[in-house]
Amino acid sequence: MPGPDGSILEQWRQRLRAAAAARTPLRLKGAGTKDFYGERLAGEVLELHGWRGVVSYDPSELVITARCGTPLSQIEAELAERGQFLAFEPPAFDADPTLGGVIAAGLSGPRRPYAGAARDFVLGTRLLAADGEALRFGGEVIKNVAGFDVSRLLCGSLGILGIITEVSLKVLPRPRVEETLRLELSAAAAVESFNRWAARPLPLSGAAWWQGAAMVRLSGAPAAVGAAREQIGGETMDAAAAQQWWQALRHCRLPPFACQVLWRLSVPPAAAPLPLPGSPLIDWGGALRWYADLPAQLAVRDIAVAASGTALCWHGAAVPRFHPLSPAVARLHQRLKERFDPHGIFNPGRLSAAL
Amino acid sequence: MPGSDIAAALAATLPPDCVLARPEERRPYECDALTAFRELPAVVVLPRTEEEVQRVLITCSRLGVPLVARGSGTGLSGGATPHPQGVLLSCARMNRVLAIDPRSRCARLQPGVPNLKISEAAAPHGLYYAPDPSSQVACSIGGNVAENSGGVHCLKYGLTVHNVLGVDGFTVAGERIELGGGGGTLDSPGLDLLALAIGSEGLLMIVTAVTVKLIPRPPCAQLVVASFPTLHSAADAVAAVIAAGIIPAALEMMDRKATAAVEPFVHAGYDLEAAAILLVESDGTRAEVDEQIGEIERVLRNCGASSLRIAATEAERLRLWSGRKNAFPAAGRLSPDYYCMDGTIPRKHVGRVLEAIGEMESRYGLPCFNVFHAGDGNLHPVIMFDSNAPGAWERADRFGAEILELCIEVGGTITGEHGVGVEKIGGMCVQFSPAERAAFAAVKEAFDPAGLLNPGKLIPTLARCAEYGKMHVRGGALPHAELPRF
C-alpha cells in the first residue's frame, strides 16, 4: 500500500515474520479497553492503533469502511453527522476502543436482540495473516455468499487468527424517535412481559431490568412508538435520563460492572428465573443475565447449562472464564488455529488456553 | 470403488429402503435447478434420523467416498450436483418441525423442512420466519443454511445468517457438533463456527437440525409501484430512498424487457412504457406504513418518477407482486432456456452496470432482462438462449461470466444469494487471490481433512484457476469443458 501509512502495514508484516522465526508470541492491542476480557494476556505487545482512518463512507450505501485503529468515537461521530449509527451498540467501557478491538471482541449492546449482533453487521474484513499476506474477505455489499464467511469468523475471534486491519460494516439510519418506558415489575414478570411484547409487532430496541424496574426502549416512526407506548404502559422517562441509563448499560458502567466477581449468563430469552443468589441485571429482553458477587463454590456453569445456556466469568477468578467448548468443537477450533496461525504467534491463550 | 460396493456398505448399516442403487432410482438426483450440470451419483441415501446420517458419514469416511448433501434440489449454482463416484444424501425424509417455542420465539427444524412450512407452523402464534427465497414453497431450510439464502426482504430482515440461531449436525468423521444457540440463546462461546457453517455449501458438515429465529408478522403491508423514464433515474431513486433514512421491506426493480415479458401472463397492469419500474414495499402497523409510504412517494417523485401507483386493495398488491415473482417462469415461456445470474454491486453502480449489460446483449446476440433486489444491489440478469442453437449455451455462459467480472470490478461480488457451487467456481479465481483461496482451503481442511464433503464446489483448485485464466484470455472458449452439457 502506498503512502506513509502503508509503511505501518509493512512494519507489522516484518514484525510477524520476526515473531514467526523466533516463535515469539504477539499480543495484539488496540486501545486496551478490553484487557480484562479473555483467558489471559501473553506475548510482546503489538500496538495496532496507528493504522487508522475512515477509508470510505457513502451513506446511501449503508456501509462504512475503516482501518482497525480508528477510534469508535470517530466512526460514531461521522455516522451521526449523516443521521446513521452502529445498531449493535458496541460497548466502549470508560474509554474509546478501536474498531479492530470492537470487532475482534464481537460484543454487542442492548439493541442486540432487536437489531442484531456485531457479527450481523460485518460485511467485510482485511486480515494480515500469519505469513504477512494481506487477505480480503467479504466486501462492501450487503449480500455476498462467495466463499466461506471468514469475516464473521473473525468477529469475536479475539485476534487469535491474525490482525484484522480493516472492517466494512453495515450501518443503519438512526431511528426517528426514541422513547423509554419504566415499569415497576418483578424480574420474573419483566422477563415474561419482554417476551410477550417481542412476539408482537412493536418497535422494541431495548428491554432490561434492574433493581425492581423494567426499562423498555422503543425506536422508530413516531406513530409506531406512540402506539407501542399505549400498549405497554408504564411511565415515560425523561429523554436525557433515559439516554444516560442506556449508555451506562451499553458501556458496562452500571454498578454491577464494578464488582470483583461478575458472571454473564447467556440463556434463552424466556428462561425462568435462575436459581442463583442475589438479584440479576437482565438485558437483551431476558437473554442476558448478569450476576454480581456470586460465591466461588457455586456451580454457575451447571445452572446455565440446565437453563440451555452458557456462563462467562466477566470479572473474577474462575478458570476458564469462557464457557468450555465440547471436545468435538474444541478440536475444530484447534485445527482452524493451526492453519491460520501455524507458529502460534497471535494472542496465544486469549480465547482458550489451548489456542 | 464401484457403486455396488458403496451401496452394500451403506445397506449393511441403514434400513433397506434408505439406499437407492439402481440407475433409474438415482436418475432424479442427477442435478439441482442448475440443470446444465448433471452427474449420476454412485448411490443415493435417504436417511430418516440423525443416527442414520451419522452412519452414512462414518461409512463414507471409512471408505474414503465423497458425500454430497441435497435439500430440495432448488439450488441455482449446482451446489447439489452429485459426485459420480460418491454418495448423494437427500434430506427429503428429514422434514419434521421438531419444536416451535413461541415464548423464546424460535423453531427447531429438521433440514428437509420447506422454508414456507416454518412460517405456516409459526402462524398460530403471530410469528414467521423472515427469509423468503422465491422458491420458498419447495426449498428446504437445510439448503437455505448451506447457501445462506436471501429473498426479497433481506434489506430489512437479513439473510439466512441473520435469522438462524444454531445448527446441530455431524462432522465428516461422524462426530456430533452443536454450533450457535440451539436453545434460542443469542450468543455462544468460542469462534463463530455457526457463521462459517452458514453458506458453506455442504463442504464443512452435515446439518441435521436448525434453530431459527421467529419474528412477529407485521399486521400491514403496502406497495408503491413507480415508473421511471430511464434506468439511471430508477437506480438513482433507489439510492435516494436509502439516503432519506428509509429501510423499505422490499425494494425491487424490473426493466422494460422484464415487464414486457411478464405482463401478458400476469396482467399486473405494469407501465410498459417505463424504462424501469420500482416496487417499494413498506410493512408494520397501519400508522407506521401510512407514514412511510408518504415519505417513499415524496422521494420517488423528487427523483423523477413519471407515475406512481399505490395498490388500492390487498388483491392488487398481491397481483403487482405476482408479476415480480413470476418473472423467471415468464422467461421460460419466452425462450427455450434461460440463465439467471446473481451478482451484487454497490447500489451507486446499478445504473452503470445495467447499461453495460445492455451493451453486452447486442454483443453476444442474446436477449437479457433484469428483475432484481435493487435495495440490496443484488442483480439477477436473465439471459435467454436456445441450447439447441450451436454455441448458444457457450455464449450465454460467457455473457454471464462477463457480467460477474463487471460486478467484481465495481466492488461487488459474483454471488449475492445463489452460491458458488460448480457454476461460479471460475469467478472465484477472479474475485479472490491465491492466498485468499488458500485460506478457504485451510477452513475446509480444518473441518474435512480428506476433502470428502461436496468436493469440487466453492473452492477452485489452482489448476482450475490456471485453466480459467487461459480461457479468460482467449475469450469465448468453452469453460468447464470436462463437464457434460444437456
Image (spheres, coloured by chain):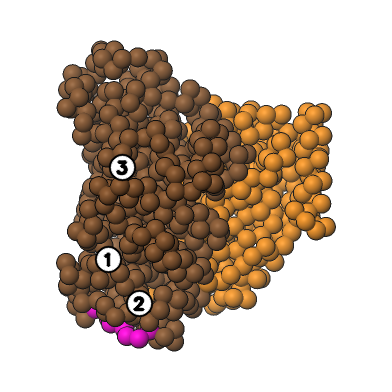
Chain colours: A orange, B brown
Mark 3 = which residue? B36
Say which of marks 1 and 2 sits in front.
2
Q: Which residues are magenta?
A: B305-311
Read off the chain for label 2: B
Label 1 sits on a secondary structure element that is helix
Whichever of labels 3 and 2 marks the residue nearer the N terminus, that label is 3
Read off the chain for label 3: B
| Foreground residue among A174 and B316 | B316
In the picture, the quarter occupied by the C terminus of chain B is top left
Mark 1 = which residue? B324
Q: Is residue A97 above or below residue B447?
A: below
| Residue at (77% x, 49% y) in the render | A9
Asked if disc 1 and disc 3 are in contact, CB closer than 8 Å, the reply is no
Mark 2 = which residue? B275
Q: Position of residue A160 (x, y in %)?
A: 66, 38
Read off the chain for label 1: B
**The quarter of the displayed image where residue A70 is located:** bottom right
Q: Is residue B391 above or below residue B262?
A: above
Q: Is residue B99 left or right of residue B345?
A: left
Give the residue type at disc 1. Arg
Whichever of labels 1 and 2 marks the residue nearer the N terminus, that label is 2
Q: Is residue B336 left or right of residue B294?
A: left
Whichever of labels 1 and 3 marks the residue nearer the N terminus, that label is 3
Give the residue type at disc 2. Ala
